């Protein structure tokens, strides 16, 4: 077991607010409330200490894919995101053949059982061809509850979320099935109306998959899904804060109407995150990444992102002007709550996993700890 540590002198963001000249005590893999006399003191004066980031929508990174890679590939992608502060990650699949998705869910489930990932998100194939984004239209299908159940069962208890176009035949019954099995039903890649979206929420949907993207725009006579998802207290909205997927005014709109307690920052990252420009595959679709923006080779649709959550955090504070405490809620506490993991991760409290991120005064990442071990050692003394 690693020696006890006391991170001292930082601005520490706690559930009750920010504490100046605060400290975080780490004993073994957990946060403790008292420090033994022999504890190592790490001086983090002039820095921020925030909870480790929790990403509920992520397709890969470091050149590796969560959507179809081997266990070794997936672990490579997980490590890449840990280097950028994401200490808890859900692996997201993309649209594919149903049997392939079920088989790959078995690979992901083993990694979830080991604690390497926090679970599985199926983004497709139960989505609208009208709003398919970077998904293969030939593989899309209506959300038949029996087929949805097949994927949930293939995940062996580790399915965390399924994105659905709930207006399609079987959509509402699939939402009900997911809710009954404790799996998040997320409204996304949808062509639903305002009224149809309200029906999905009443049926049990609780998340908006990358709000604004892959859904009808907000209209003054046809308010569409965006309005329904923003106004309902039961919905948490995912936002991709990379400066490409959302105009800053759209992000501000979401925060204003949903409030910080109902926002979850995600990456929607694909293989190129933390790796670089070039050609990649997102499921069966070929993607060109240029200047950090991923687009399908055919058609040019945005194909996920190359975002890491440390960049999303810095942008939210320095560009969008959001309070640090609101950003911590959106990037850690809220997604942890959605996953049912708030008793372990998402905030800096005694008894929880010692997952934390150290940021300098410019909000650049300088340290990452996961379960009491430095992934990125700040080497500050």
Image (tube, helix red, strand yellow):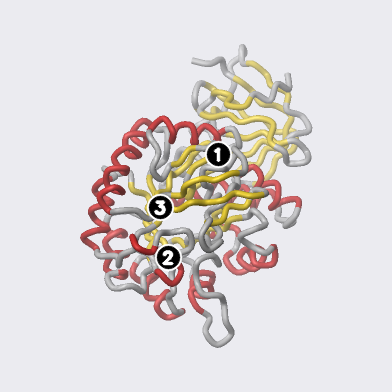
Quadrant of the snapshot with the C terminus? top right
Spatial distance from mark 2 to mark 3, Cα to Cα?
15 Å
Q: Residue at x 56, y 56 (%)?
A: 295
Secondary structure found at label 2: strand
Q: Quadrant of residue 273?
A: top right
Vertical position of residue 232 compared to residue 108: above or below:
below
Vertical position of residue 77 compared to residue 135: above or below:
above
Vertical position of residue 254 compared to residue 101: above or below:
below
Query: What residue is pinned by disc 3?
Result: 94
**Relative horizontal placement of residue 167, taking residue 363 as reference (left or right):** left
Q: Residue at x 33, y 60 (%)?
A: 139
- Between marks 2 and 3 in the image, the one whose residue lies nearer the viewer: 3
Q: Residue at x 31, y 44 (%)?
A: 105
Spatial distance from mark 1 to mark 2, Cα to Cα?
24 Å
Residue 364 percent coordinates (x, y): 72, 38
Secondary structure found at label 3: loop
Query: What residue is pinned by disc 1?
Result: 86
Residue lying furthest bottom in this view? 221
Query: What residue is pinned by disc 2?
Result: 187
- Between marks 3 and 1 in the image, the one whose residue lies nearer the viewer: 3
**Relative horizontal placement of residue 217, taking residue 325 as reference (left or right):** left
Residue 192 percent coordinates (x, y): 43, 75
Which of pointers 3 and 1 lies earlier in the amino acid sequence? Answer: 1
**Relative horizontal placement of residue 213, taking residue 243 as reference (left or right):** left
Spatial distance from mark 3 to mark 1, Cα to Cα?
21 Å
Q: Nearer the viewer, residue 88 or 293?
A: 293
Residue 200 percent coordinates (x, y): 37, 71
Residue lying furthest front in this view? 298
């Amino acid at each position: 077991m690693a020696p006890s540590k006391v991170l001292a002198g930082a601005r520490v963001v706690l559930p009750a607010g920010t504490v100046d000249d605060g400290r975080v005590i780490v004993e073994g893999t957990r946060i403790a409330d008292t420090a033994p006399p022999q504890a190592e003191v790490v001086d983090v004066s002039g820095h921020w200490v925030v909870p480790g980031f929790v990403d509920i929508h992520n397709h890969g990174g470091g050149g590796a894919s969560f959507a179809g890679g081997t266990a070794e590939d997936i672990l490579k992608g997980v490590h890449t995101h840990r280097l950028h502060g994401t200490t808890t990650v859900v692996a997201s699949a993309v649209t594919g053949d149903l049997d392939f998705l079920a088989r790959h869910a078995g690979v992901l489930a083993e990694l979830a059982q080991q604690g390497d990932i926090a679970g599985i998100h199926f983004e497709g194939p139960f989505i609208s061809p009208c709003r398919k984004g970077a998904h293969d239209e030939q593989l899309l299908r209506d959300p038949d509850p029996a087929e949805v159940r097949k994927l949930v069962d293939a995940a062996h208890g580790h399915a965390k979320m399924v994105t659905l176009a709930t207006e399609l035949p079987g959509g509402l019954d699939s939402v009900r099935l997911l809710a009954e099995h404790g799996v998040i039903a997320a409204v996304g890649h949808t062509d639903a109306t305002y009224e149809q979206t309200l029906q999905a929420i009443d049926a049990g949907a609780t998340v908006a998959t990358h709000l604004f993207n892959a859904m009808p725009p907000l209209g003054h006579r046809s308010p569409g899904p965006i309005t329904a998802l923003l106004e309902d207290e039961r919905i948490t909205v995912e936002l991709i804060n990379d400066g490409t997927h959302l105009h800053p005014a759209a992000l501000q709109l979401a925060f204003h109407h949903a409030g910080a307690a109902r926002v979850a920052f995600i990456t929607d990252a694909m293989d190129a995150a933390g790796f670089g420009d070039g050609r990649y595959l997102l499921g069966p679709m070929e993607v060109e990444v240029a200047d950090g923006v991923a687009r399908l080779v055919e058609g040019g649709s945005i194909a996920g992102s190359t975002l890491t959550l440390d960049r999303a955090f810095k942008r939210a504070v320095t560009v969008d002007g959001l309070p640090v405490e609101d950003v911590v809620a959106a990037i850690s506490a809220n997604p942890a709550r959605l996953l049912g993991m708030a008793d372990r991760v998402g905030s800096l409290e005694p008894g929880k996993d010692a997952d934390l991120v150290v940021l300098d005064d410019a909000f650049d990442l300088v340290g990452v700890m996961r379960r009491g071990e430095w992934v990125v050692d700040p080497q500050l003394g």
